[in-house]
Image (spheres, rainbow, N blue to C red):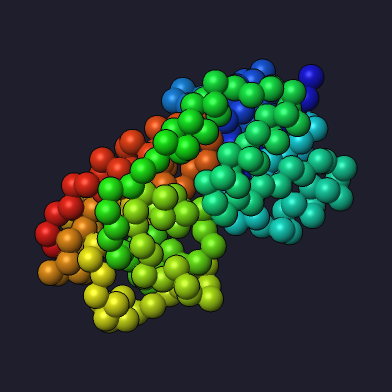
Amino acid sequence: MTRVVSLVPSLTEAVAVTCPQVLVGATDYCTHPEGLDVARVGGSKYPDLARVFALRPDVVLMNVEENREQDAAALREAGVHVYVTYPRTVDGALHELGELMGFLGAGTPGWLESARAAWAGVAPAGQARAVIPVWRRPWVVLGSDTFAGDVLRRLGIVNVYASSPGRYPRPSLDEIRATRPDLVVLPDEPYPFTVDDGPEAFAGTGYALISGRHLTWYGPSLAQAPTILAGQLAVRSPA
């Protein structure tokens, strides 16, 4: 039996709900599915490689954006197969998930079929120019060529920073305000924006609080993401 350690929370969920018997380790941030009972190996950025090796994995799942190349290199040097993902669009994520499930011999699970159908049926109502912060102190926003940016684009959000040369620009707060967006989209991860932490920085501009998991995770949550995010984006509060 293949032994899999996942260093990517969304892929952990995908494997755990599809072929749980192969999953032997995951990061401390792998919170789904609830009640997941596997060995923990630290964080995505700084995994405890000694713990990973102790689990004798055949495959370690990684992501270009979430994990470090030096950890991937150390795993490869030790003879561990490193399976790397890097989707930048919804379609790319669905394709890569299909490839991963095939690699694991899991076929096409029902949640993946549901996700494909859900996104094929997306028809956004209207458009809004928006800024999407993902961190503060310092401020970091979604820029170009990101999976989360494509998720929002498909839902009718026009990212003010979509043409930025960087994927995660770090404009000052004054620079963000100067773009005069119609909307500020505030996810609850990676930075946990809340009604009391974030909106106050954008007085006079409407905001929407959304699920960071459904915005950034590519896995089973993609099946519900269009409906959940569209509903949250429709609830626009004045700052």
Residue 158 position in % (x across, y down): 36, 62
**Which of the two residues, 221 or 138, is positioned nearer the viewer here?**
221
**Which of the two residues, 27 or 19, is positioned nearer the viewer here?**
19
Q: Image height check: is 175 above or below 129?
A: below
Left or right: where 85 falls relative to 17:
right
User: Quadrant where the C terminus lies?
Assistant: bottom left
Left or right: where 3 falls relative to 158:
right
Numbered marks: total: 0
Residue 62 position in % (x across, y down): 67, 46
Left or right: where 17 falls relative to 173:
right
Left or right: where 191 falls relative to 69:
left
Residue 69 position in % (x across, y down): 71, 58
Residue 226 position in % (x across, y down): 38, 39
Q: Image height check: is 163 above or below 90?
A: below
Based on the displayed image, in which of its 4 quarters is residue 53 positioned? Answer: top right
Q: Is residue 207 visible?
A: yes
User: Quadrant where the N terminus lies?
Assistant: top right
**Which of the two residues, 112 or 140, is positioned nearer the viewer here?**
112
Q: Image height check: is 80 above or below 146?
A: above
Based on the displayed image, in which of its 4 quarters is residue 178 positioned? Answer: bottom left
* Residue shown at 43% from the left, 64% from the top: 142
* Residue shown at 18% from the left, 47% from the top: 235
* Residue shown at 49% from the left, 43% from the top: 217
Q: Is residue 30 visible?
A: no
Q: Image height check: is 107 above or below 138?
A: above
* Residue shown at 30% from the left, 65% from the top: 129
